[in-house]
Image (cartoon, grey):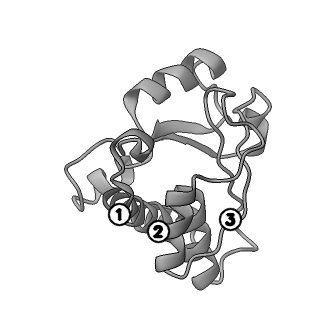
Amino acid sequence: MAEAVLAHLVKEAELSDKITLDSAGTGGWHVGDPADSRTLAVLKKHSIPYNGRARQLQRSDLNEFDYILAMDTENLSGIRRLLGNPKDGQPEIALFLSYANAAELLTRTEVPDPYYNNQFDEVYELVLAGSQALLDHLRKTHEF
């Protein structure tokens, strides 16, 4: 969901030529699968298209991306175990909502997994706030 929402905001801001994004899981359980039908329903309700497929995070992502963001601390730990601590020139590894926290837009630090609690609308609101804050951070940091 976060990939779709952020991609939508990036496109609306006409920054698609400057920002490349992707999503990946720390586990391989759903590799190749489309998004959960409940995620797609929430995205459709907000007129956000998405047709991505699940993939698993790879060490090579360190060379491809400037930011690797986790939805919760458990996945953040998994990312750090897989990728290690970034060296100079490697991506920032952080919680997705850390930018919204820094901007004092949210106090919540983690995005819950709606797969089990069925709170897809609540997750959408968190992801939207997080995506807006991240986009603001990217604009300021990278001056576009």
Q: Are marks 2 and 1 in contact (CB under 8 Å)?
A: yes
Q: Position of residue 73 (x, y in %)?
A: 38, 29
The amino acid type found where label 3 is placed reads: Ile
Give whichever of discs 2 and 3 has the lower sequence position: 3
Which residue in the structure is indicated by mark 2?
42
Give whichever of discs 1 and 3 has the lower sequence position: 3
Task: Please state which of residues 57 and 1 is positioned toward the viewer in this rendering.
Answer: 1
Give the residue displayed 40% in from the left and 35% down from the top. Answer: 72
Q: Position of residue 23 (x, y in %)?
A: 65, 48
Between marks 2 and 1, how big is the CA–CA gap?
Answer: 7 Å
**Is the residue marked by circle 2 packed among few (<14), some (14-19), or many (20+) residues within 10 Å?**
some
Task: Please state which of residues 93 and 70 is positioned toward the viewer in this rendering.
Answer: 70
Residue 117 seen in this snapshot = yes
Give the residue displayed 57% in from the left and 52% down from the top. Answer: 36
Q: Which mark is residue 19?
A: 3
Which residue in the structure is indicated by mark 1?
121
Q: Position of residue 98 (x, y in %)?
A: 36, 47
Question: For the residues carrying marks 2 and 3, which lies nearer the camera in this image?
Answer: 2
